[in-house]
Image (cartoon, helix red, strand yellow):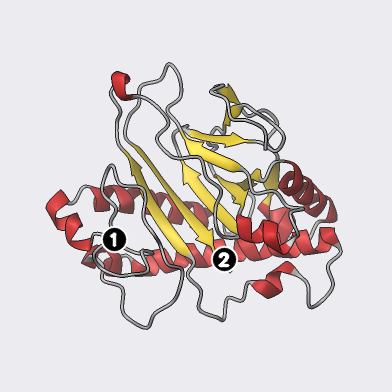
Amino acid sequence: MTSQSNSQDSAQGLPNTDLQGLFDRDPAEATKLLDASKQYGFFYLDFRTISKSKTVLSLINQIYRFEEELFSLPQDYLMKYDVDEIGYMKLNGYKPKGRNFGHGVLGLSDEPYYRPPIFDENMPMLKAYMLAMQEATASIHDALSRALGLQVGRRLEEFHRPDRASPCILRLLKYHPQPAEERGASGTPHTDLGSLTILFTKQPGLQVLRKGCDKWEYVEPRAGHAIMNIGDGMSLLTNGLLHSSLHRVAPPPGQAVTTRYSFASTQIL
Protein backbone atom coordinates (compact mmCIF):
# COMPACT_ATOMS: atom_id res chain seq x y z
CA MET A 1 0.00 0.00 0.00
CA THR A 2 1.32 3.40 -0.90
CA SER A 3 1.53 6.28 1.53
CA GLN A 4 -1.66 7.92 2.80
CA SER A 5 -2.42 11.53 1.86
CA ASN A 6 -5.03 14.06 2.93
CA SER A 7 -6.65 14.36 -0.46
CA GLN A 8 -10.43 14.86 -0.24
CA ASP A 9 -11.45 13.51 -3.67
CA SER A 10 -14.69 11.63 -4.30
CA ALA A 11 -14.47 8.04 -5.43
CA GLN A 12 -15.27 7.83 -9.13
CA GLY A 13 -16.58 4.71 -10.78
CA LEU A 14 -17.13 2.63 -7.66
CA PRO A 15 -18.83 -0.47 -9.08
CA ASN A 16 -22.53 -1.13 -8.55
CA THR A 17 -23.77 -4.70 -8.09
CA ASP A 18 -27.38 -5.67 -8.72
CA LEU A 19 -28.45 -8.00 -5.91
CA GLN A 20 -31.26 -9.50 -7.98
CA GLY A 21 -28.68 -10.35 -10.64
CA LEU A 22 -26.74 -12.26 -7.99
CA PHE A 23 -29.90 -14.07 -6.86
CA ASP A 24 -30.51 -14.99 -10.51
CA ARG A 25 -26.91 -16.25 -10.78
CA ASP A 26 -26.21 -13.96 -13.72
CA PRO A 27 -22.63 -14.75 -14.91
CA ALA A 28 -22.02 -11.16 -16.04
CA GLU A 29 -22.99 -9.83 -12.61
CA ALA A 30 -20.69 -12.37 -10.94
CA THR A 31 -17.76 -11.30 -13.14
CA LYS A 32 -18.42 -7.63 -12.38
CA LEU A 33 -18.51 -8.42 -8.66
CA LEU A 34 -15.21 -10.29 -8.84
CA ASP A 35 -13.53 -7.41 -10.66
CA ALA A 36 -14.78 -4.95 -8.03
CA SER A 37 -13.58 -7.17 -5.19
CA LYS A 38 -10.12 -7.53 -6.71
CA GLN A 39 -9.58 -3.92 -7.78
CA TYR A 40 -11.43 -1.86 -5.18
CA GLY A 41 -12.47 -4.05 -2.28
CA PHE A 42 -15.57 -1.82 -2.13
CA PHE A 43 -18.77 -1.81 -4.14
CA TYR A 44 -22.41 -0.72 -3.94
CA LEU A 45 -25.09 -3.39 -3.53
CA ASP A 46 -28.49 -2.42 -4.97
CA PHE A 47 -31.42 -3.71 -2.90
CA ARG A 48 -34.08 -1.86 -4.88
CA THR A 49 -34.50 -4.49 -7.60
CA ILE A 50 -35.03 -7.60 -5.48
CA SER A 51 -38.48 -9.14 -5.14
CA LYS A 52 -38.57 -8.38 -1.40
CA SER A 53 -37.23 -4.84 -1.81
CA LYS A 54 -40.18 -3.18 -0.06
CA THR A 55 -39.73 -5.39 3.00
CA VAL A 56 -35.94 -5.07 3.15
CA LEU A 57 -35.91 -1.30 2.60
CA SER A 58 -38.52 -0.97 5.35
CA LEU A 59 -36.27 -2.96 7.71
CA ILE A 60 -33.37 -0.64 6.91
CA ASN A 61 -35.47 2.42 7.77
CA GLN A 62 -36.67 0.75 10.97
CA ILE A 63 -33.08 0.25 12.12
CA TYR A 64 -32.30 3.92 11.52
CA ARG A 65 -35.25 4.82 13.75
CA PHE A 66 -34.25 2.20 16.30
CA GLU A 67 -30.70 3.48 16.72
CA GLU A 68 -31.88 7.08 17.02
CA GLU A 69 -34.21 5.97 19.80
CA LEU A 70 -31.44 3.92 21.41
CA PHE A 71 -28.86 6.71 21.41
CA SER A 72 -31.40 9.21 22.74
CA LEU A 73 -31.57 7.27 26.01
CA PRO A 74 -29.88 9.02 28.98
CA GLN A 75 -26.11 8.71 29.06
CA ASP A 76 -26.05 7.35 32.61
CA TYR A 77 -28.49 4.63 31.54
CA LEU A 78 -26.40 3.65 28.51
CA MET A 79 -23.27 3.50 30.66
CA LYS A 80 -24.83 0.60 32.56
CA TYR A 81 -24.05 -1.38 29.42
CA ASP A 82 -20.45 -0.19 29.04
CA VAL A 83 -18.82 -2.63 26.63
CA ASP A 84 -15.65 -2.73 28.73
CA GLU A 85 -17.54 -3.67 31.89
CA ILE A 86 -20.18 -6.22 30.94
CA GLY A 87 -18.09 -8.97 29.36
CA TYR A 88 -14.72 -10.09 28.09
CA MET A 89 -15.78 -10.51 24.45
CA LYS A 90 -16.47 -6.82 23.76
CA LEU A 91 -18.88 -7.75 20.99
CA ASN A 92 -21.92 -6.28 22.70
CA GLY A 93 -22.54 -3.22 24.79
CA TYR A 94 -22.30 0.56 24.64
CA LYS A 95 -19.12 2.38 23.70
CA PRO A 96 -19.27 6.05 24.78
CA LYS A 97 -18.11 9.06 22.81
CA GLY A 98 -14.33 9.39 22.69
CA ARG A 99 -13.54 5.74 23.22
CA ASN A 100 -12.70 3.68 20.15
CA PHE A 101 -9.99 1.32 21.28
CA GLY A 102 -9.89 -1.88 23.25
CA HIS A 103 -8.75 -5.47 23.19
CA GLY A 104 -11.72 -7.34 21.78
CA VAL A 105 -11.89 -11.09 21.99
CA LEU A 106 -13.62 -12.98 19.21
CA GLY A 107 -15.37 -15.96 20.64
CA LEU A 108 -18.69 -17.41 21.64
CA SER A 109 -20.27 -17.92 25.01
CA ASP A 110 -23.45 -19.48 26.34
CA GLU A 111 -23.89 -16.53 28.67
CA PRO A 112 -26.86 -14.29 27.77
CA TYR A 113 -25.98 -10.86 26.44
CA TYR A 114 -26.71 -8.10 28.91
CA ARG A 115 -28.68 -5.51 26.93
CA PRO A 116 -31.31 -2.78 27.32
CA PRO A 117 -34.94 -3.96 27.05
CA ILE A 118 -35.32 -1.92 23.87
CA PHE A 119 -33.38 -4.65 22.06
CA ASP A 120 -35.78 -7.39 23.10
CA GLU A 121 -38.72 -5.21 22.11
CA ASN A 122 -37.23 -4.89 18.62
CA MET A 123 -35.69 -8.36 18.34
CA PRO A 124 -38.06 -9.64 15.59
CA MET A 125 -37.12 -6.68 13.41
CA LEU A 126 -33.40 -7.07 14.09
CA LYS A 127 -33.51 -10.80 13.33
CA ALA A 128 -35.42 -10.17 10.10
CA TYR A 129 -32.81 -7.64 9.02
CA MET A 130 -29.89 -9.96 9.80
CA LEU A 131 -31.58 -12.80 7.90
CA ALA A 132 -32.01 -10.54 4.86
CA MET A 133 -28.33 -9.60 5.02
CA GLN A 134 -27.38 -13.26 5.40
CA GLU A 135 -29.25 -14.02 2.16
CA ALA A 136 -27.43 -11.16 0.42
CA THR A 137 -23.98 -12.27 1.57
CA ALA A 138 -24.72 -15.88 0.64
CA SER A 139 -25.43 -14.73 -2.92
CA ILE A 140 -22.12 -12.82 -2.94
CA HIS A 141 -20.20 -15.91 -1.79
CA ASP A 142 -21.90 -17.99 -4.47
CA ALA A 143 -21.20 -15.43 -7.22
CA LEU A 144 -17.55 -15.03 -6.27
CA SER A 145 -17.09 -18.81 -6.06
CA ARG A 146 -18.57 -19.22 -9.54
CA ALA A 147 -16.49 -16.39 -10.99
CA LEU A 148 -13.34 -17.87 -9.44
CA GLY A 149 -14.18 -21.35 -10.67
CA LEU A 150 -14.03 -22.82 -7.17
CA GLN A 151 -15.08 -26.44 -6.80
CA VAL A 152 -17.02 -28.12 -4.02
CA GLY A 153 -14.89 -28.20 -0.89
CA ARG A 154 -13.29 -24.86 -1.69
CA ARG A 155 -16.30 -22.62 -2.34
CA LEU A 156 -16.53 -19.52 -0.18
CA GLU A 157 -20.02 -20.25 1.13
CA GLU A 158 -18.71 -23.49 2.63
CA PHE A 159 -16.67 -21.41 5.08
CA HIS A 160 -19.78 -19.43 6.11
CA ARG A 161 -22.30 -21.85 7.56
CA PRO A 162 -25.53 -20.19 8.76
CA ASP A 163 -26.44 -23.32 10.74
CA ARG A 164 -23.42 -22.82 13.01
CA ALA A 165 -23.02 -20.17 15.69
CA SER A 166 -20.63 -17.36 14.80
CA PRO A 167 -19.74 -13.95 16.27
CA CYS A 168 -21.26 -11.95 13.39
CA ILE A 169 -22.11 -8.51 14.69
CA LEU A 170 -24.37 -5.54 13.95
CA ARG A 171 -22.81 -2.24 15.01
CA LEU A 172 -25.11 0.72 15.57
CA LEU A 173 -23.06 3.88 15.11
CA LYS A 174 -23.55 7.51 16.06
CA TYR A 175 -21.00 10.16 15.10
CA HIS A 176 -21.36 13.36 17.09
CA PRO A 177 -21.15 16.89 15.68
CA GLN A 178 -17.65 18.37 15.53
CA PRO A 179 -16.84 22.06 16.08
CA ALA A 180 -14.81 23.55 13.23
CA GLU A 181 -11.70 23.86 15.39
CA GLU A 182 -11.82 20.15 16.26
CA ARG A 183 -12.38 18.79 12.79
CA GLY A 184 -10.22 15.92 11.68
CA ALA A 185 -10.46 12.26 10.86
CA SER A 186 -13.16 10.76 13.11
CA GLY A 187 -11.92 7.22 12.82
CA THR A 188 -8.57 5.49 12.65
CA PRO A 189 -7.75 4.03 9.21
CA HIS A 190 -8.40 0.30 9.34
CA THR A 191 -9.43 -2.80 7.46
CA ASP A 192 -12.26 -5.03 8.66
CA LEU A 193 -11.58 -8.31 10.39
CA GLY A 194 -14.41 -10.35 8.91
CA SER A 195 -15.15 -11.52 5.41
CA LEU A 196 -17.80 -8.98 4.34
CA THR A 197 -19.14 -5.75 5.84
CA ILE A 198 -22.52 -4.26 4.92
CA LEU A 199 -22.80 -0.53 5.68
CA PHE A 200 -25.88 1.66 5.48
CA THR A 201 -25.50 5.41 5.91
CA LYS A 202 -27.32 8.53 4.75
CA GLN A 203 -24.57 11.08 5.27
CA PRO A 204 -21.18 11.24 3.53
CA GLY A 205 -18.06 10.66 5.58
CA LEU A 206 -16.70 7.25 4.62
CA GLN A 207 -13.31 7.42 2.91
CA VAL A 208 -11.48 4.59 1.20
CA LEU A 209 -7.85 4.22 0.16
CA ARG A 210 -7.99 2.17 -2.99
CA LYS A 211 -5.48 -0.48 -3.90
CA GLY A 212 -2.34 1.14 -5.30
CA CYS A 213 -3.55 4.71 -4.59
CA ASP A 214 -2.24 7.34 -2.21
CA LYS A 215 -5.36 9.53 -2.04
CA TRP A 216 -8.30 9.15 0.29
CA GLU A 217 -11.59 9.20 -1.60
CA TYR A 218 -15.11 9.74 -0.29
CA VAL A 219 -17.73 7.08 -0.97
CA GLU A 220 -21.08 8.82 -1.39
CA PRO A 221 -24.12 7.06 0.09
CA ARG A 222 -26.88 5.97 -2.28
CA ALA A 223 -30.52 5.46 -1.34
CA GLY A 224 -31.53 1.81 -1.44
CA HIS A 225 -27.92 0.65 -1.64
CA ALA A 226 -25.50 -0.81 0.86
CA ILE A 227 -21.81 0.05 0.74
CA MET A 228 -20.04 -3.30 0.80
CA ASN A 229 -16.41 -4.03 1.51
CA ILE A 230 -14.20 -7.08 1.46
CA GLY A 231 -12.68 -7.90 4.84
CA ASP A 232 -9.42 -9.49 5.90
CA GLY A 233 -11.09 -12.89 6.26
CA MET A 234 -12.19 -12.96 2.63
CA SER A 235 -8.79 -11.74 1.50
CA LEU A 236 -7.17 -14.53 3.51
CA LEU A 237 -9.47 -17.18 2.01
CA THR A 238 -8.47 -16.11 -1.51
CA ASN A 239 -4.75 -15.75 -0.78
CA GLY A 240 -4.95 -11.96 -1.18
CA LEU A 241 -6.73 -12.02 -4.55
CA LEU A 242 -9.75 -10.19 -3.14
CA HIS A 243 -8.67 -6.89 -1.65
CA SER A 244 -9.39 -5.60 1.85
CA SER A 245 -9.03 -1.81 1.56
CA LEU A 246 -8.12 0.66 4.26
CA HIS A 247 -11.00 2.99 5.13
CA ARG A 248 -11.96 5.57 7.75
CA VAL A 249 -14.59 8.17 8.59
CA ALA A 250 -13.67 11.82 8.03
CA PRO A 251 -15.71 15.05 7.88
CA PRO A 252 -16.36 16.21 4.29
CA PRO A 253 -14.68 19.55 3.51
CA GLY A 254 -16.92 22.60 3.42
CA GLN A 255 -19.85 20.81 5.03
CA ALA A 256 -21.28 21.19 8.50
CA VAL A 257 -20.44 18.22 10.68
CA THR A 258 -23.83 17.19 11.99
CA THR A 259 -24.91 14.12 13.91
CA ARG A 260 -24.40 11.08 11.68
CA TYR A 261 -26.05 7.71 12.12
CA SER A 262 -25.05 4.53 10.32
CA PHE A 263 -25.04 0.81 10.96
CA ALA A 264 -22.77 -1.96 9.79
CA SER A 265 -23.06 -5.72 9.96
CA THR A 266 -19.80 -7.64 9.79
CA GLN A 267 -19.69 -11.27 8.77
CA ILE A 268 -17.07 -13.22 10.69
CA LEU A 269 -15.98 -16.73 9.77
Specify whether residue 205 is in view: yes
SS at mark 2 in the image? helix
Of 210 and 257, nearer the camera is 210
Chain-order first, disc 1 or disc 2:
1
User: What is the three-letter code of the residue carrying label 1?
Assistant: Val
**Would residue 29 be found to the left or right of residue 209 on screen?**
right
Density class for disc 2 (Cα within 10 Å; few <14, some 14-19, many ≥20) is some
Q: Where is residue 77 in the image (x, y as percent from the top left)?
A: 14, 57
Q: In which quarter of the image is the N terminus?
A: top right
Query: Is 32 located above or below residue 258 in the figure?
Result: below
Location of residue 22 by image quarter: bottom right
Q: Can you tell which mark lies on residue 134?
A: 2
The residue under the point 43% across, 77% down is 108
Which residue occupies the extreme bottom position in the image?
Answer: 110
The residue under the point 46% across, 42% down is 201
Mark 1 lies on residue: 83
Of 246 and 219, nearer the camera is 246
Q: Position of residue 242 (x, y in %)?
A: 73, 52
How much space separates mark 1 and mark 2, taking CA atoms? 25 Å
Q: Position of residue 223 (x, y in %)?
A: 52, 39
Q: Position of residue 143 (x, y in %)?
A: 76, 60
